[in-house]
Image (spheres, helix red, strand yellow):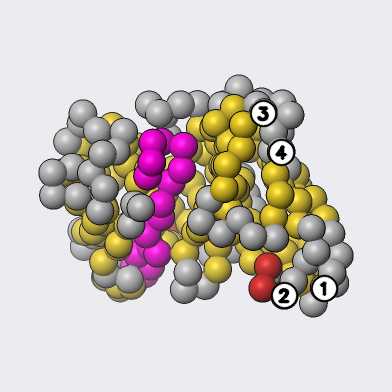
Amino acid sequence: NAGVTQTPKFQVLKTGQSMTLQCAQDMNHEYMSWYRQDPGMGLRLIHYSVGAGITDQGEVPNGYNVSRSTTEDFPLRLLSAAPSQTSVYFCASSRDNNYGYTFGSGTRLTVV
Amino acid sequence: KQEVTQIPAALSVPEGENLVLNCSFTDSAIYNLQWFRQDPGKGLTSLLLIQSSQREQTSGRLNASLDKSSGRSTLYIAASQPGDSATYLCAAPGNGNNRLAFGKGNQVVVIP
């Protein structure tokens, strides 16, 4: 099992550009989430999904979109990048309420 | 809203001492609680998952306890080693298990 795979690992964007951060898991997990990690702020939930076709907003959803067309994939879209979105982004997945979460290795995004 | 607090934010200990890291959470209606380790510039590695029905969980030199009634969890690391230097994160579910709330972490330095 590859676990949770995030691509790319690093990305530099110009303000106003759009991009998609990819997240894929091969563990047949129903729950998937996106977090951002900023110094002094800790990890904050952006969006999450409890299964294919179901998504919901987390703590800091503005400026981001998600979709869940398959169990395996949960891409995060930045619609119009802003410097405030400079952060490290983590994707995570879990089987269900009785299991813990597995995290990807992260995407370090810089918006200039 | 689940809020997670970790104390102390940072600590340094000499090699061989036992480490005690504290985590408190506000919503005790949790299915489980998870402890992670994060090395600088890296992703999150799951250390221990404690189910709500358990009082503690052990893995090697690591032991985590859970007291739901008081909203507390403690991570013990026995006989600390320089390789234990990292940030330790506590995560508790809020609004079901499909969204995690994180503390800001305990940054640990073990001095050889």
Please count the marks in the image.
4
Identify residue for label 4.
A67
Which label's residue is closer to the chain start, 3 or 4? 3
| Residue underneath mark 2 | A83
Image quadrant in which you'd find residue B40: bottom right
Answer yes or no: are tags 2 and 1 on the same subunit: yes
Front residue of A50/B79: it is: A50
Which residue is label 1 attached to?
A15
Mark earlier in primary sequence (2, 1) = 1
Q: In this rendering, does residue A41 appear at all? A: yes
- How far apart, in angstroms, are the residues tagged by discs 2 and 4? 23 Å
Distance in Å between CA atoms under marks 2 and 1: 7 Å
Mark 3: few, some, or many residues within 10 Å (few <14, many ≥20)? few
Q: Is residue B107 left or right of residue B57?
A: right
Q: Which mark is residue B107?
A: none
Relative image position of residue B52 (x, y in whole percent): 24, 33
